[in-house]
Image (cartoon, rainbow, N blue to C red):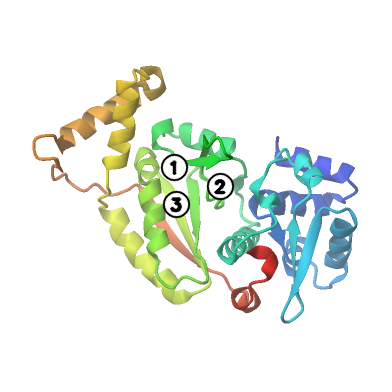
Amino acid sequence: MTHEQRVRNLQRLGYSSQQGDFLAMAGMLSGFFMRRQYRAFAGSRGNGPATRLARRVLASGHAWTREFPGRLLLYQLCSRQFYRALGEEDSPHRRRKRRMPYIQRRVFALDFVLAHMKRQRRYLYTQDEKIDACLSRGAHDLTLPWRAYQFGSAAKEHRRCFADRFPMYVAQDGVLCFSFIHCAEEVAIESFKTHLMHYEPLFRSLDRFRLWGVSTDRRVLEKMRVFAGDYLEGAEYDQRVEHYQLEKLFRQERIAEMGQKGLDRLRDLRHAYSERTGQWRPAENKPLPGTFHPYLLRHSYKALATLIPHWWN
């Protein structure tokens, strides 16, 4: 489903074209929004348009809200009917009980996109859109950032790609752009380092990419910039997980699933690993074909950082 189709579906639910455009973006990227975010989207200085939108989503039962200190209202889009109109009826954004880091990252992600909306970018909203964009640029399924989850008493395993749901887009020059949203409660950048490790096989398979680091703290952004600079210049990462996954597929004779790229990668990893010593042979560090760009969020998020309502725990 395209973004235009989502907007038309929301118009059938009673929203205007502009309201549907904003809500489709907010629903796919965040699941949350604030009135000031709609004012920024609509280019409105007054509160009238944002108030009308807020009343409509609440009257339609498509959202619920809570008030924070300073009269800050945060709306969560949680209706099954609303997400059915977006083609994402089972979206994880529907779940009401969320912890603060998740809420912050979703609000930050929408602010990041709103700040750059005037530039010509094609945002990738769904898992399939992101996978297709990567595969069309030389990536292989085995290099994608898959994660395995288990749900229910039967503990059935489900795989998700790009599970962090950070904004991704295709720039005007065709370069694929990624982002990492830093949580305001974290001072260290360990989660950023883990994120890079998880995405490195994908980054190495692309000809070019850009990575945005998004935070509310200048000091955190500086740490990220320094680490990303060294990392992109010549990064080493733990290849054990990738080696294990490829060997498992090979021994199960799932050759078609691996493809030629997977077979070539397994050959290289076997060459790099010494079974006699159980160690990885020293390899020349090759720079990653990407650039890092810090972005400082300029809004105040103190209310979100200082209060954790019971409905998020």
Q: Picture coordinates of residue 93 (x, y %)?
A: 67, 51
Viewer-closest of 103 and 286: 103
Mark identifier at residue 167? none
The residue labelled by disc 1 is 145
**Picture quarter containing residue 49?**
bottom right
Relative to residue 8, is residue 60 depicted above or below? below
Task: Indicate the amino acid at tag 2.
Answer: Tyr
The answer to whether residue 200 is left or right of residue 101 is left
Task: Determine the CA span between mark 3 and mark 1.
Answer: 16 Å
Task: Determine the CA span between mark 2 and mark 1.
Answer: 16 Å
Whether residue 32 is visible, yes or no, is yes
The residue labelled by disc 3 is 210
Residue that appears at 49% across and 64% down: 182
Sequence order check: which comes first, mark 3 or mark 1?
Answer: 1
Q: Picture coordinates of residue 231 (x, y %)?
A: 30, 57
Which quadrant does the C terminus fall into? bottom right
Q: Residues within 10 Å of mark 3 (few under 14, many from 20)?
A: some
- Asked if the residue under mark 3 is in contact with the one under mark 2, i.e. CB atoms within 8 Å, the reply is no
Q: Secondary structure at mark 1?
A: loop
Q: Residues within 10 Å of mark 1 (few under 14, many from 20)?
A: some
The residue labelled by disc 2 is 169
The answer to whether residue 118 is left or right of residue 255 is right
Relative to residue 38, is residue 9 depicted above or below? above
> Among all residues in the image, which is located at the extreme bottom?
70
Sequence order check: which comes first, mark 2 or mark 3?
Answer: 2
Residue that appears at 70% across and 40% down: 88
